[in-house]
Image: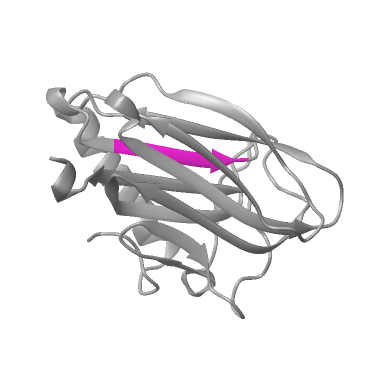
Amino acid sequence: MAAPSGGRNGVCAGLWAALLLGAVALRPVEAVSEPTTVAFDVRPGGVVHSFSQNVGPGDKYTCMFTYASQGGTNEQWQMSLGTSEDNQHFTCTIWRPQGKSYLFFTEFKAEVRGAQIEYAMAYSKAAFERESDVPLKNEEFEVTKTSVAHRPGAFKAELSKLVIVAKASHTEL
């Protein structure tokens, strides 16, 4: 598995994402379909909330974002899902289009079903206008085969974007 799990710095992880996404784009059978983007509200109040979407033939893949946050008012976020032309890869991006979130996240977890994560990255700030994405430090989050989540005690409560690239599970092939 090529997902960062604490040992890579943001530059290496970003380079890996660029190489992986470039390789997917260069292979004609792996061209990515037009993504589906759905807006949803991230609500503060300290209560755990979830939002999920399905994609692929027969809704074969699921991306679910579960979180709890404090402070401020609702923020509009987006979830974008896309699949490769051969439906063996899918991407899930969860982000605040205005860049930085002003909410304090007490926890977060993005899970995929029907696939295994090949790459995942979490960001404290999403690119907006002339500013770039700012990745979380690797010690703030962890990546497994099916999820990317905060690390209790290490996560600094700032989240604005999550990116996941996943490949169909062997049982799904």
Between residues 154 and 168, which one lies in front from this camera angle? 168
Query: Residue at coordinates 79% horizontally, 52% vertically from top-left?
Result: 44
96 w.r.t. 15: above or below: above
Between residues 64 and 102, which one lies in front from this camera angle? 64
Residue sticking out furthest to the right: 72
Q: Position of 94 compared to 83: left or right?
A: right
Query: Residue at coordinates 14% horizontally, 22% vertically from top-left?
Result: 28
Question: Residues in magenta?
Answer: 90-95
Is residue 18 located in the magenta-colored stretch of the structure? no
Is residue 92 located in the magenta-colored stretch of the structure? yes
Between residues 158 and 128, which one lies in front from this camera angle? 158
For the C terminus, give its image quadrant.
Answer: top left
83 w.r.t. 73: above or below: above
Query: Residue at coordinates 76% horizontally, 46% vertically from top-left?
Result: 43
Q: Position of residue 84 (x, y in %)?
A: 25, 28
For the N terminus, give its image quadrant.
Answer: bottom left
Query: Residue at coordinates 67% horizontally, 60% vertically from top-left?
Result: 158
